[in-house]
Amino acid sequence: AQSVTQPDIHITVSEGASLELRCNYSYGATPYLFWYVQSPGQGLQLLLKYFSGDTLVQGIKGFEAEFKRSQSSFNLRKPSVHWSDAAEYFCAVANFNKFYFGSGTKLNVKP
Amino acid sequence: DAGVIQSPRHEVTEMGQEVTLRCKPISGHNSLFWYRQTMMRGLELLIYFNNNVPIDDSGMPEDRFSAKMPNASFSTLKIQPSEPRDSAVYFCASSHDRGPFSGNTIYFGEGSWLTVV
């Protein structure tokens, strides 16, 4: 079955600490991969996406993600978290006729 | 540039009433999506239009739900009659080409927060 897994429902990090949010997918071929962020009361906003080329992708707000085919993963990283990064983060996976969002990871940032 | 515009932002209605949610996609986008978000079920794709034609409505929960896209700049999602279990945030989103199916970004509106009492 095709699916997207975000194994961490909640994560708390201290401001200034590094962050890694996990995303694993199950697809037959290399899909299109996305990370979106949702602030409270808002819609989803694209952070970054990957569909070919360099497996390390840079996004907005200082985020990056690395596609690892061998691990079927597309983890999101940020070297130093800011309080404004507190939000919910969604990994999404697509191919030519399917598009799935993960269940999301809520990030809490401690002062 | 204006993003995806949804109205109303908030609606509280009584069970049995008709609810109509409206969406104006980003100009030039030819794919439009309606999503529902709840704590229990997360983000669910309800229906996807491409060039104003419904392509996939398999996510529409039941006959009480209907969606239309009469032209490239307007879409509606209607619930009739509404039930308390329909309470959720409903997002409209738009994209170029075939959206994520062709690797394109989906742009979301700010959502319509529906409460059915």
Image (cartoon, coloured by chain):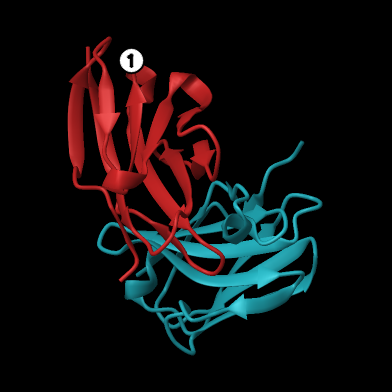
Single out the residue that lies furthest toward the bottom. B63
Residue A36: quadrant of the picture: top left
Mark 1 closeness class: few <14, some 14–19, many ≥20 residues within 10 Å: few
Question: In the image, B10: left or right of B4?
Answer: left
**In the image, residue A15 above or below residue B108:** above
**In the image, residue B44 above or below residue B10:** below
Report the residue at 46% width, 47% height from top: A33
Task: Give me the chain that's cyan.
Answer: B
Question: Measured from the top left, where is residue B95 in percent x and y?
Answer: 67, 53
Q: Colour of chain A?
A: red
Tag 1 subunit: A
* Amino acid type of the residue that numbered disc 1 sits on in the rendered structure: Pro
Pointer 1 residue = A79
Question: Measured from the top left, where is residue B105 in percent x and y?
Answer: 60, 47
In-front residue for pair A18/A27: A27
Report the residue at 67% width, 62% height from top: B98
Residue A79: quadrant of the picture: top left
Question: In the image, A11: left or right of A86?
Answer: left
